[in-house]
């Protein structure tokens, strides 16, 4: 049975459809990331699940209980969910321990103190029980907010961009710590983020949204390796885009032919190539194998990878500017000619679609 389920949920603000027919299920112990660009409706979905927005259409269930819909609308405090917000929402006039105990209004005395101590120990903040939020770093405040949400032992955790206010180095460490804490808690977790790398790091499954709708749900590897459309393919990082035309279920590119099965003959399409799908090597000595050549325009070291700017060598002078990402240090000089081979498992063909 699912710990949290949204069934055909829709929500509008005045005449603007923020969420359209969204269905999603989470099971205990699972981390699901609701991913998408700003304004796509992901935070509204979380607020509907939390009871912070009144449900207009659809159902929200926890286990076998309807908590919103069919004339029922439990308030947030009765839904048994843990909430962590982008700004952490700690009470400045309360100590760390008092902030954590705030959600334990039904517990009292020694039991409450033990629960608070256990929650703080779980996030490594037991030494700061008597401190106040303004004395803590951003990462420490995030841990306290997480302890407060976990203290009542909720079956569902809802997190809205919880790492966006942290600096880069701290964010990576806190993400890692939070993932392990959430897994240990056994709660079903719905985490909202606009960062695809964060979603791939945190999630067992990703639900990617566009314009109020979920366009694909699956494991991170599924969305990355088997995108259902150009939006999904392009959301997970830089991508090279080429225009093409379907000819006998194939499309020609500067680096060879790629398959376009199921697409109409003569259809205008986009060929999407991930930068890491372009493999570079010195030109072959055999002139008959030199069809896939490109000129280096620039190369830059990006830390763990190198980015090489390429211009395919062609006859019409209008060839595209492409990027290849190579592991480690690879910095060929400008104007060097290289042979390019294409990893077709990281190359996708989709019909041209109208802008939304």
Image (cartoon, rainbow, N blue to C red):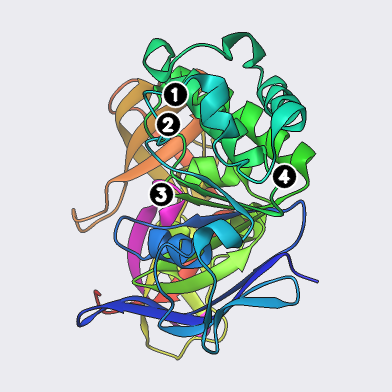
Q: Which residue is mark 1?
A: 94
Per the model, the C-alpha gap separating discs 4 and 3 is 27 Å
In this view, the mark in front (1 or 2): 1
User: What residue sits 78% from the left and 47% below the top?
Assistant: 186
Q: Which residue is mark 2?
A: 90
Element carrying mark 2: loop
Residues packed near mark 3 inside 10 Å, few (<14), some (14 to 19) or many (20 plus): many
In this view, the mark in front (3 or 2): 2
Q: Position of residue 187 (x, y in %)?
A: 72, 50
Q: Is residue 306 left or right of residue 154?
A: left
Q: Which residue is mark 3?
A: 194
The quadrant of the rendering that contains the N terminus is: bottom right
The quadrant of the rendering that contains the C terminus is: bottom left
Q: Which residue is mark 4?
A: 153
Residues packed near mark 1 inside 10 Å, few (<14), some (14 to 19) or many (20 plus): some
Q: Position of residue 46 (x, y in %)?
A: 47, 60
Q: Which residues, given as a range, are shown in magenta?
A: 235-249
């Amino acid at each position: 049975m699912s710990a949290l389920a949204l069934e055909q949920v829709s929500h509008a603000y005045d005449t603007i459809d923020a969420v359209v027919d969204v269905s999603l299920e989470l099971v205990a112990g699972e981390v699901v990331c609701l991913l998408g660009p700003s304004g796509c409706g992901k935070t509204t979905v979380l607020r509907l699940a939390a009871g912070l927005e009144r449900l207009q259409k659809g159902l929200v269930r926890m286990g076998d209980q309807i908590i919103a819909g069919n004339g029922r609308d439990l308030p947030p405090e009765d839904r048994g969910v843990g909430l962590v917000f982008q700004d952490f929402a700690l009470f400045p006039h309360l100590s760390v321990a008092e902030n954590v105990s705030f959600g334990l209004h039904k517990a009292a005395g020694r039991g409450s103190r033990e629960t608070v101590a256990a929650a703080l120990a779980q996030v490594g903040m037991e030494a700061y029980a008597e401190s106040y939020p303004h004395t803590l770093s951003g990462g420490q405040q995030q841990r306290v907010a997480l302890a407060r949400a976990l203290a009542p032992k909720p079956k569902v955790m809802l997190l809205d961009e919880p790492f966006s206010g942290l600096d880069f180095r701290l964010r990576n460490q806190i993400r890692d710590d939070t993932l392990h804490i959430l897994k240990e808690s056994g709660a079903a977790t719905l985490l909202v983020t606009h960062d695809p790398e964060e979603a791939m790091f945190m999630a067992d499954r990703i639900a990617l949204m566009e314009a109020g709708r979920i366009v694909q749900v699956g494991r991170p590897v599924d969305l990355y390796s088997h995108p259902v459309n150009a939006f999904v393919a392009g959301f997970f990082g830089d991508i090279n885009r080429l225009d093409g035309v379907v000819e006998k279920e194939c499309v020609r590119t500067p680096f060879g032919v790629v398959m376009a099965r199921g697409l109409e003959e003569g259809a205008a399409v986009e060929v999407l190539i991930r930068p890491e799908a372009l493999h570079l090597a010195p030109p072959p000595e055999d002139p008959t194998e030199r069809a896939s050549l490109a000129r280096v325009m620039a190369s830059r070291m990006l830390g763990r990878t190198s980015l090489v700017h390429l211009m395919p060598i062609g006859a019409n002078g209008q060839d595209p500017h492409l990027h290849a990402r190579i592991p480690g240090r690879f910095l060929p000089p400008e104007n060097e000619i290289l042979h390019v081979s294409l990893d077709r498992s990281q190359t996708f063909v989709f019909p041209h679609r109208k802008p939304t």
